[in-house]
Amino acid sequence: MVDSVTLEVIRNACEAVCEEMNANLIRTGYSPNIKERRDCSCALFDADGEMIAQAENMPVHLGAMPFSVAAAIEHFPPETLAPGDGILLNDPYHGGAHLPDLTLVTPVFHDGEVVAYAANRAHHADVGGSRAGSVAADSTEIYQEGLRIPPVKLFEGGDANEAVFDLILMNVRTPDERRGDLRAQEAANQTGKRRFTELVEKYGPATITAALEEINDYSERRMRAEIADLPDGTVAFEDVLDDDGLGNEDLPVKAAVTIDDDTVTVDFAGTAPQTAGPINAVIAVTTSATYYAVRCVTDPEIPPNHGCYRPIEVRAPEGTIVNPNPPAAVVGGNLETSQRVTDVVLGAFAEAVPERVTGAGQGTMNNVTFGGTDPRDGSQYAFYETQGGGFGGRAGKDGLDGVHVHMSNTMNTPVEVLETAYPLRIDRYEFRQDSGGAGEFRGGLGLRRDITVRDHEARFSLLSDRRRHRPYGVAGGESGATGGAVLYADGETERLPGKAIRELPPGATVSVRTPGAGGFGPVEARDPEAVRRDVRLGKVSVAAAREDYGVPVEEDLAREDDRDGDT
C-alpha cells in the first residue's frame, strides 16, 4: 500500500502531466483545428494499457482512446518496442473511432522496461478520401472516407519513419499541415514521457506501480458507491437520428439502463441496423458515449481512469448503427451517432433521477467542411469545423447558449483565424432567438453562422442532425428548436438537408443554423423577471414571452426580432 498523501500527490501529478501534454499539443499544432478549436485529447496509460489519467478535453476521444492503446499493444507487444518508438493508428475497426482522428501511442521506458504509455488523439482536418476535410456526408463505405492506418511505427528509436510519413502525406490534400500536426502529437507524447519518467525516478517503479493500481481501485470504489445510490431497476429511452443522408430516415437508437446494486448495464438492443450512410458508430465510440453519460449522473470529481469504468457494461448488438461490421462508413458515427447515444442514455436516467439530467443538448456537431484551391497562393486547402448550439436546461440553471455539447467540447474557429487561414469570410455570427426550449430553466440557444466563399469555386459538405426531430426537454420542459442550413448562390436560395454535398460558385454563402436545447421543469414555474431579462438581451422574442411563458413584455424593451424569419 502507498500512503494516502503520496497517493494523492502521484494522482494529481499524473493529471498535471496530461494537461501539460495537451497544452504542448495545442501550442505546437499547425492547423486551426488543433490550435484554435482544440480538437485533441491526451492521456496516460499504465504498462498494461489501462488509463491512468486524462486531460479534460474531448469526451468522444477519451472514452475511446483505451481501445486504440489496446490495439497498439496487441500489434506491438512491449518486447517489440524500443525507447523512441511511437505507434500511429486511426482504423475504426482496430481501435480507432473515425479516420480523421489519428492516435499516437508512445511507450515510456525505465531500466529497459515499459512502465507506461503516453497517448494522444487529434482530429486532422484532412486524411484523404473522396471529399476535402474527410467528412463526406455521402460515403457508403470506409474506403471513401480517407487513409486507413492500422497500428504502425511512425517513429522508431527516436527517428521519424519517413516511409510511413511519405505514405500518409502523399494521400492527403494538405501535407505540410498534416506533417506539422503529427510532429505536434509526437512533441506532446515526449512531454508526457519525460514528466512520467521524472515521477518514476522520484518515487521508484515499485511505488509508482502500486500507486497506479490503487488510483484505479479508488475510482472504482467511488463509482460503485455513486451507482449504489441510484434506484435499482431498468429504465429505457428511445430517440432517433433524422436520416443517414441516403434516404433512410428516423433511425432509432434505444437504450435500456439497468442499475443493479453498484453496477450499470446499458443495452442497445432494438437500435437500427447498420445503414448505408456514414452514421455508423463503432463500439469504441458507443462505449465512450455511454461512459460519459454515466459520469454525468454520478460524481464528476471521480478521477477519470480505467477504474471508474469497471462497473459499467455496454451491450451493443453487432451489425447495428452502434456496433457496425466493416466496411460500413463510420465518419459520422463518431460525430453524430455518439451524440444520440448520449441523449438516449441520459434520457433513460431522466426516468429515474431527472434532477441529475439536463434537457437534451443540440444533439449534433454540425460538421462543416469547405475545400478547394486557395486563390491567394494556388495551394489546396481543407477547412473543417464543428459548430456549437444549445446546452440543455438543468435543475437550478438555464442552459448555456452557443456552446459545443456533450461528446464534442471543442471551441469555435475564431472569425479572425478562419478568414486569415482560408479564402472564406464570416458574414454573420449570432445566437438564434427563441431556439431554446421553454421551461422553468430555459434550454440554451443555437447559433447562426454564415460562411461565404471568396473568389473561387469550392466543395462543401454538411454532416448534421436534429433537423427534423427536436431535442427533448426534461421534467416538464419543452423541446428545443431544430437546426437548418440555407445556401445562397447565384441569386437563388436553397434549404439544405442535414446531410448535403454541394459544389459552390464564387460568392456563395452557406448559412448554418444550429439547434437549441431542451428546457428543464414546467414552463409556468419560470420567473417572469428571467423572461423579461431574456427579452431585453434578445434571446427571447416578445411573441415567445407572451405565447410560451404567458409573460406580458413592453415592446420597447425588446431588441429587433430575427430579420429573416429564421425562428
Image (spheres, helix red, strand yellow):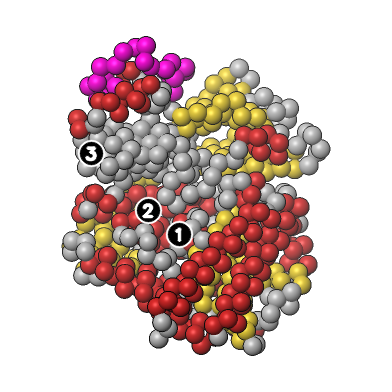
- Mark 3 in CB contact with mark 1 (< 8 angstroms): no
Mark 1 highlights which residue? 285
Question: Camera-side residue: 149 or 362?
Answer: 362
Q: Is residue 283 left or right of residue 192?
A: left
Image disc number at residue 232: none
Image disc number at residue 521: 3
Task: Name the residue: 79% across, 34% down.
Answer: 376
- Mark 1 in CB contact with mark 2 (< 8 angstroms): yes
Find the magenta span and give its range: 545-567
Residue type at numbered disc 1:
Val
Mark 2 highlights which residue? 341
Provide the major secondary structure of the magenta segment: loop
State which mark lies toward you, 2 or 3.
Answer: 3
Ranked by sequence position, the earlier of labels 3 and 1 is: 1
Task: Name the residue: 54% across, 29% down.
Answer: 429
Residue type at numbered disc 3:
Gly
Q: Position of residue 208 (x, y in %)?
A: 51, 82
Residue, far front:
5
Magenta span includes 557: yes
Quick one: quadrant of the N terminus? Answer: bottom left
